[in-house]
Image (tube, helix red, strand yellow):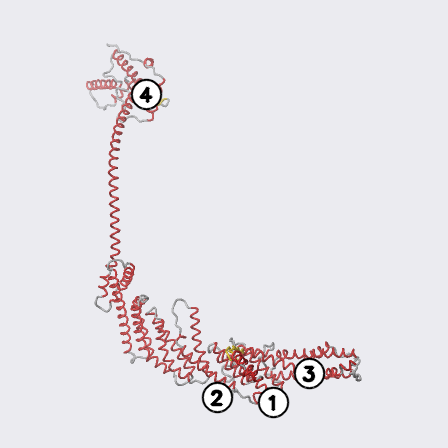
């Protein structure tokens, strides 16, 4: 039996192969790398039945293979287990021979299996076989202990081979990348060259495209000529209604503008002429279509005039024309907006308007004339006819105005000319009656009626927006001017006949009873309750209750009844007005009829003339009263009527000033007087030259202010009235003062040439003069107050006139009192015991007496 050779141990191996520190560090580094990297995919460590498997155990952080073996391999054959296996066989009843054979076969199989499990080729039967098996197993165990390093070595070798292969691949890859870089550089150069070429080609393409587009854009205006001419020359009367017609007109405008802006282009003038011909053709088509439609509808309506009523015809006229507005207005708008700067288009548009107005006038003329006849122009009141006619014309003209702007957008001047023709039917009936109308009241109402419509138009004009508004006042200005001219003429005749030429009568100066409770005054504003009843007369001159003018060219007697414009509630004021002087009544009445009915300048001239003539008439009446009654009556009459005139003129917002020019012959008169005094100057050439230079009449400007003249005249009369009343009241004092002045010594007496006996007034003379003064003052004041109440009867006016009289009377008494005291000290007046009544006591006496 051969001896098993024992291998080298691990200690011997480490002794012989001792590693340096660097090599150990390399091993540790590889250990760490192996611990982190996976094993190669083609390296597997598998366990075999004959060789124990290697298990990886981790010690000190390093994976090492660890041998393991089955317990059954290391242990000897177990007989019990074999017996159990034999017993596990099928429990068949066999014979002893068969049973022995089977037992022997099972034992052989178990031995073979046990030998195979312990890694032996055949069962161990002898001691030598056991030693051989044990040496083999010992050698394998030693070998298993060295497998960790062998495995590690094989792993390192494997990694080295892998790294070498990886390095070879890296070198191959680098070579490939180098070749690829060379090829990329080549391709990049070729690509850049291709890109540059493409960009140049693209630029050229863009330039050519832009040039082509510019040419196409410019040629597009030239290319529009053919389709436009084809459309406009196509047959049919309804070319204007085609959808593309209006767009073609807009294209035509663009083409014409383009040709005008680019006259340097070839054939641009020729195309411009053809485009304008096409535009004229289009505008003519619009005109022909619109005119034919309007005339056809007008002819259709005209045939129905005799078969239907006026109301149904009027509504039918407007319905038919409004129905075609949606078709006519867009076409008329196209024609209208091209009229600016083109006379031929403007003429076409005016032809359309003329055809429209002519058609409408033919349809409405008979209806309007028939309606005016129904209003009764020849009979009835003129104001009623004018008012009804204006109401009808306003409705008709408003409908025509709205219908026109439903069809057209401009042409207001032609529209108002057409409306004036419609209004002429009313004017033709009004004008003859206005010319022959003599009633100032009727003419004034007519002017007021027409001015109301004009003022409404002015109000709308101030507040109007961008829309169109109908102005009826423009249609009746001619009628208003005729009415104003007739009113001014009748007013001038009235002023001349009824104011200037008025002859006073006895009953004009009659006064009402003194104690009449209905008698009051509107001269000045009073705190009394009676003034409220007549306040409306002062504030509203247009409602003065003066008789109306009923004459033709000659004045008639004034009516005793108040005007219809005067309200019934003002009977008290009407009674007062009747007491005014007729010339004053007529003046205020004519002013109330003219105010706001004529132009302001005309009214001011007429008012100034009327007021001046009224003032002159009042002065003449004052002189008549002075002759027939007394000077005091004449003054109070003039004061009363001047106050009334002044207060009634206050509400009139007008300047009653007449400015003019006149010739001044005063220098001529002075020169002629000098020649008359010295007749020798006639033969002096220098004097004749001076006459020619300074003796010519001069043109001077004159200004007559009626308000100022009334104020001055009133002031003068009041001063005269106050002075005369004071003079009569202080007459006893004046007589005594004259006596005192006569008793004063003259210059000769003072110088001692001739002395007269000394004259002295006694106290009884002074006291008698004071008593006579009191009686005279009381009597005079009572008489003045009575007269004031007869003429004026106004508390405030009484105070205004009486107060200066009282002050002047007291002033005269004060002077008398001072003179008496002075003369008493001189001895001219005897001793005064007691003293005369003091000035203060006299003032209290006058005040108490008045109250």
Disc 3 secondary structure class:
helix
Residue at (24, 10) in percent of width and height: 2
Q: Quadrant of the C terminus?
A: bottom right
Viewer-proximal residue among 133 and 113: 133
Viewer-proximal residue among 635 and 712: 712
- Alpha-carbon span between mark 1 and mark 2: 28 Å
Q: Find disc 4 in the rendering and name its residue.
A: 66
- Alpha-carbon span between mark 4 and mark 2: 164 Å
Q: Find disc 1 in the rendering and name its residue.
A: 628
- Alpha-carbon span between mark 1 and mark 4: 175 Å
Q: Find disc 3 in the rendering and name its residue.
A: 729
Q: Quadrant of residue 101?
A: top left
Q: Find disc 2 in the rendering and name its residue.
A: 554
Q: Quadrant of residue 705?
A: bottom right
Q: Are marks 1 and 4 in contact (CB under 8 Å)?
A: no
821 in relation to 102, above or below: below
Q: Position of residue 557 (x, y in %)?
A: 51, 88
Query: How many labels sit on residues?
Result: 4
Q: Earlier in the sequence, mark 4 or mark 2?
A: 4
Describe residue 138's horizontal placement relative to residue 377 as left or right. left
Q: Earlier in the sequence, mark 1 or mark 4?
A: 4
User: In the image, which is nearer the foreground, mark 1 or mark 4?
Assistant: 1
Q: Are marks 3 and 2 in contact (CB under 8 Å)?
A: no
- Alpha-carbon span between mark 4 and mark 3: 170 Å
Q: Quadrant of the N terminus?
A: top left
User: In the image, which is nearer the foreground, mark 4 or mark 3?
Assistant: 3
Q: Are marks 3 and 1 in contact (CB under 8 Å)?
A: no
- Alpha-carbon span between mark 3 and mark 2: 48 Å
Residue 669 visible in the picture: yes
Q: Position of residue 405 (x, y in %)?
A: 34, 70
């Amino acid at each position: 039996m051969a001896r098993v050779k024992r291998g080298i141990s691990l200690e011997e191996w480490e002794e012989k192969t001792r590693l340096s520190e660097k090599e150990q560090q390399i091993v540790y580094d590889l250990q760490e790398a192996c611990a982190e990297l996976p094993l190669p995919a083609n390296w597997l460590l598998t366990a075999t039945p004959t060789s124990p498997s290697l298990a990886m155990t981790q010690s000190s952080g390093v994976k090492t293979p660890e041998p393991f073996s089955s317990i059954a391999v290391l242990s000897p054959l177990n007989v019990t287990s074999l017996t159990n296996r034999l017993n596990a066989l099928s429990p068949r009843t066999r014979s002893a021979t068969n049973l022995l054979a089977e037992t022997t076969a099972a034992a052989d199989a178990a031995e073979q299996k046990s030998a195979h499990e312990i890694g032996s080729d055949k069962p161990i039967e002898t001691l030598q076989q056991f030693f051989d098996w044990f040496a083999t197993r010992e050698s394998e165990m030693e070998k298993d202990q060295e497998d960790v390093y062998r495995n590690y070595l094989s792993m390192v070798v494997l990694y080295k081979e892998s790294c070498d292969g990886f390095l070879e691949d890296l070198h191959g890859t680098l070579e490939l990348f180098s070749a690829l870089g060379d090829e990329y550089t080549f391709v990049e150069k070729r690509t850049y060259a291709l890109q540059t070429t493409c960009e140049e080609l693209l630029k050229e393409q863009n330039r050519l495209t832009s040039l082509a587009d510019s040419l196409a854009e410019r040629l597009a205006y030239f290319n529009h000529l053919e389709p436009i001419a084809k459309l406009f020359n196509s047959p049919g009367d309804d070319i204007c209604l085609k959808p593309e017609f209006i767009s073609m007109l807009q294209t035509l405008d663009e083409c014409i503008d383009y040709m005008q802006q680019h006259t340097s282009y070839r054939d641009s003038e020729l195309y411009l002429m053809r485009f304008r011909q096409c535009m004229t053709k289009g505008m003519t088509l619009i005109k022909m279509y619109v005119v034919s439609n309007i005339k056809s509808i007008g002819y259709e309506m005209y045939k129905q005039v005799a078969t239907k009523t006026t109301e149904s015809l009027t509504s039918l006229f407007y319905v038919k024309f409004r129905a075609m507005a949606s078709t006519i207005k867009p076409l008329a708008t196209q024609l209208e907006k091209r009229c600016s700067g083109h006379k031929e288009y403007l003429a076409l548009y005016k032809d359309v308007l003329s055809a429209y107005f002519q058609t409408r006038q033919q349809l409405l003329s008979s209806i309007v004339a028939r309606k005016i006849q129904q209003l009764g122009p020849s009979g009835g009141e003129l104001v009623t006819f004018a008012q009804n006619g204006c109401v009808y014309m306003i409705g008709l003209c408003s409908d025509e105005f709205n219908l026109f702007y439903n069809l057209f957008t401009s042409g207001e001047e032609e529209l108002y000319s057409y409306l004036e023709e419609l209004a002429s039917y009313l004017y033709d009936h009004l004008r003859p009656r206005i010319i022959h109308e003599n009633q100032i009241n009727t003419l004034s109402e007519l002017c007021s009626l027409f001015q109301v419509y004009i003022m409404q138009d002015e109000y709308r004009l101030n507040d109007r927006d961008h829309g169109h508004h109908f102005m009826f006042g423009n249609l009746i200005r001619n009628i208003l001017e005729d009415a104003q001219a007739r009113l001014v003429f009748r007013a001038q005749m009235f002023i001349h006949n009824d104011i200037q030429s008025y002859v006073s009568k006895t009953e004009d100066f009659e006064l009402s009873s003194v104690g009449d409770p209905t008698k009051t005054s509107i001269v000045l504003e009073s705190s009394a309750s009676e003034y409220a009843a007549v306040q409306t007369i002062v504030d509203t001159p247009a409602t003065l209750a003066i008789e109306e003018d009923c004459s033709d060219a000659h004045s008639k007697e004034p009516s005793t009844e108040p005007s219809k414009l005067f309200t019934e509630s003002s009977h008290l004021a009407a009674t007062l007005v009747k007491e005014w002087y007729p010339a004053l009544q007529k003046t205020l009445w004519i002013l109330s009829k003219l105010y706001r009915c004529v132009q302001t300048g005309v009214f001011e001239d007429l008012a100034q003339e009327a007021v001046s003539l009224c003032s002159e008439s009042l002065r003449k009446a004052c002189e008549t009263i002075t002759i027939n009654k007394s000077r005091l009556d004449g003054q109070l009459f003039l004061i009363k009527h001047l106050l009334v005139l002044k207060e009634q003129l206050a509400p009139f917002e007008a300047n009653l000033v007449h400015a003019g020019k006149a010739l001044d012959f005063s220098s001529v008169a002075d020169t002629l007087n000098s020649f008359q005094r010295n007749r020798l100057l006639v033969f002096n050439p220098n004097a004749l030259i001076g006459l020619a230079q300074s003796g010519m009449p001069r043109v001077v400007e004159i200004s007559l202010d009626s308000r100022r003249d009334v104020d001055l005249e009133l002031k003068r009369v009041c001063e005269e009235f106050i002075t005369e009343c004071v003079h009569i009241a202080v007459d006893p004092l004046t007589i005594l003062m004259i006596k005192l002045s006569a008793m004063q010594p003259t210059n000769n007496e003072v110088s001692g040439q001739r002395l007269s006996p000394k004259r002295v007034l006694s106290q009884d003379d002074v006291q008698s003069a004071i008593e006579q003064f009191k009686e005279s003052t009381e009597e005079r004041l009572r008489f003045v107050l009575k007269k004031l109440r007869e003429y004026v009867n106004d508390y405030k006016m009484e105070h205004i006139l009486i107060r200066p009289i009282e002050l002047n009377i007291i002033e005269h008494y004060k002077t008398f009192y001072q003179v008496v005291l002075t003369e008493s000290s001189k001895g001219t007046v005897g001793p005064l015991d007691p003293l005369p009544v003091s000035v203060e006591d006299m003032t209290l006496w006058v005040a108490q007496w008045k109250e």
